[in-house]
Image (tube, coloured by chain):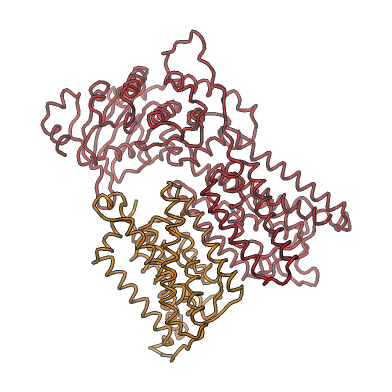
Amino acid sequence: MTIFLASVGFGLLTAAVLAIAAVGFTLQFAVTNVLNLAFAAIMTAGAFTAYGINQLGVSVWVGLPVAMVACAALSVALNLLVYAPFQRRGSAPITIVIVSLGMALIIEFGTQAVVGGISVSYKMSQGHTYKLGGLVLTTVQLAIIAISVVVMVAAYLTLRYTKLGKSMRATSANRQLARNCGIRTGRVITTTWALTGALGGLAGTVYAIDIGSFGPTSTDLFVVLILAAVFLGGPGHAYGAMLGALLIGVATEVSAAYIVPSYKYVIAFVVLLAMLAVRPTGLLGART
Amino acid sequence: MTYLITLLVYAAVDAIACLGLSLQFGVAGVTNFGFIIFQAAGAYIAAILALPPQSANGAFQHYIGGWNLPFPLPWLGAAAAGAILALPFTFLVGRRLRGDFAAVGLLVTAVLLNLLVMNYVPLFNGDAGVAIVPAPLQSQVMTTTTTGYQWGFAIGVVVLLAAVFWLVRRLTESPFGRSLRAMRDNDKIADSLGKNLLQLRTGMLVLGGAIAGLSGGVLVSFISVWSPAAWTYAETIVLFAAVIIGGRGNHVGAVLGAIIVPVGFEESTRLITNANPSLPPNLLPSLQWVAIGLLIALFLWFRPQGVLPERKRVMAVPEPAAGAAADGPLLVRQRTPPSGSPAERDTILQAIDVSRDFGGVRAVSGVSLSVARGTMTGLIGPNGAGKSTLLAVLAGTDRASSGTVRYEGQDVTGLPAYRRARLGLVRTFQLASEFKRLTVMENLLSAAPGNRGDTMRGALAGRRYWRNDEQATVGRAADILHRFGLADLANSYAGDLSGGQRRLVEIMRALMTDPAMLLLDEPMAGVHPELAHRIGEMLTQLSRDGLTVLMVEHELAIMDEFCDPVIVMADGSVLAQGTMAQLRERAEVVEAYLVG
């Protein structure tokens, strides 16, 4: 029972990190219509931006917002310089996916060329360890969960109540129609790249904090979890991604407690393939 | 010398793999981001077939099998392994799943399988991988380090490359290859013309897998080791880069790409490292990946067709035989109407209470209608009335949420579009739907059913096996081209034509399927009025020959002139049916059309 509860605690932590990444990825896809496989590479870039600042002797909690800004900029640049031109030319979706893989290589291995192939860690204190009815979590881990909850609530409020959120939803549903209704879709899309890029930077940094020791290719496997969460909820559905992240996060960590930990990704993988095979629109997606 | 031989073998192995990918991705448009796992499967299987049991050599490594089989069984096993591994993935490449989602599924599979093989030692010795894999004929030749043996190996691999090249070329340059390229350019249209996408893609996954597996088997018997580090997911991207740079759909380009990208990059990295030993060990390999990412993006932007673009298949267009009636029947197949009551014989297509929902929106709502044989029936209605959706449900490119579709007395509600097309029920699309990188002639040929060369087996049997069918098909296509006045454009890429010409291509292509009934979605939209009129006359003549047409059209003048009866739809339901003259008398129709 203790093992189970402890693994649920880890699961919530993984779910918290995963939810930030999955919501970022799925919103990006919904609004911009780019299946951006470089998202995880942007997470890596964010984690290492925070690392660079941390190396200067500054707290990683200061590095975190800097990483978010940097990733927002990187994400916007990626769209303006690469994806948007390809989309304007009318390239097939699969061409843009291939380009995004190329971008993933450039960012990920560009980072590796700068920092080297070794794994690094932030200099930070984990804080107290709290035992909450069987769940064992440190201050830092609780902070990550709190950040994630704040992000989820903010995402919900933005999508539900703000003009930006409504414009994003309209652009996602039908870009042409949204434009005809007077929504400045170009601006909405650029804003989306910035916001989801910032989410990527945030996710990358808290992921790096969570796993402790990280390298330029550390997010390669995390992509499996992100995609599983996104497809479980339905690609393009923000709330679906939240639900997916929660289910996948807890399921992988709980299964890790009972089978060999290195196989914990298998459950996410099986979920992903099953969703692709049976219901590619996800649990919350419309049945076509 | 050894260096040259090694280079030659690497180049040949990469070229074999790239040919597999060139067929899969370049010709058939199946984007397999997990391509490398098929090479890996071949390598491991070849290794454990050739190796002695794991207890040999002091049992320093663990693996299953260890059958100690003689050459060439390990290589054959490698190809078989790649082919068999492809089977579980066929569920990803059917009609339902978007190509990019399927690609992502395969990419994730590659990442995960690598992790599993790395962690599960009993299978293939985990992270360390299998080592000292015997070379072909090692026990016979005693030593495999002599230059003679090495040369023999290299030549053998080059011969194998030639054989694979011959194979993929034979498939590509056949009616079967044409179907693959049609599917690549527009899979939905290929489906509506009677191509079985699942079967075609499964064939490509299996064959591409076999070729990748073979390349892995050859490689492992040359380098004698194989571990997870050799087949990370990113290696697939290298092969994609090679095919994109070399030229998608051009097999010579694929070989060239294999020499430029994997071999060229490996070697230049190695040479620079040797010249500058002081560089950080990770710098150049990292930059090599960056360069590959850059190359992919730059090529896709500046030269998407690659260094050697896909060849244009120019064909001679036979002149119509002198004295042959230029207005003889265009339809070849005589269809016997099903027996039954006279009403059943007269009705070719019937919708019974058909509905189609999208989320909460009911696009088609309880539509019942029947189309009489040999008529040109019109379907009109305001925008959003559900005309195109109804057409899609009738053709099977979309499925009905409820209700029944009967065609020739048979319930076809559950049949996919390609099966209905094979029964003679063929649709065209509202949006441009030509196969862009096929010539006009090829667009027509791709739709012809029953060509003996239009199966993998038929294509492999060679040109002699299908030449007669092809000739007959070309003759028929030429006949149609002459009648529509497009013979001069037969060898132009369909993607280069004007909008009106593309509509013609689409109608001609639909006729090539030898349909009993055509479902046309705004065939005259955007077409010059004179040309529209000619299309109308063509269709009228065809309906006199027995063809039934159901046509969505906004231009009421066209309806007036050619269609009888005309069905009016509004808000997803059938409002009225009759001649245009009758319909004009009815207030609710005028209202729906003018106000709705």
Shown in red, the chain is B
Shown in orange, the chain is A
* Residue A252: x %, y % from top left: 47, 72
Q: Quick check: A40 left or right of B131?
A: left
Q: Quick check: B363 left or right of B476?
A: left
Residue nearer the viewer, A139 or B515? A139
Q: Is residue B262 above or below residue B403?
A: below
In the image, what residue occupies the spot 49% across and 82% down? A54
In the image, what residue occupies the spot 64% across and 38% down? B169
* Residue B372: x %, y % from top left: 29, 25
Residue nearer the viewer, A136 or B307? B307
In the image, what residue occupies the spot 34% across and 74% down? A151
* Residue A72: x %, y % from top left: 41, 67
* Residue B190: x %, y % from top left: 46, 37
Quarter of the image containing the N terminus of chain A? bottom left
Q: Quadrant of residue A227 in the image?
A: bottom left
Residue nearer the viewer, B231 or B244? B244
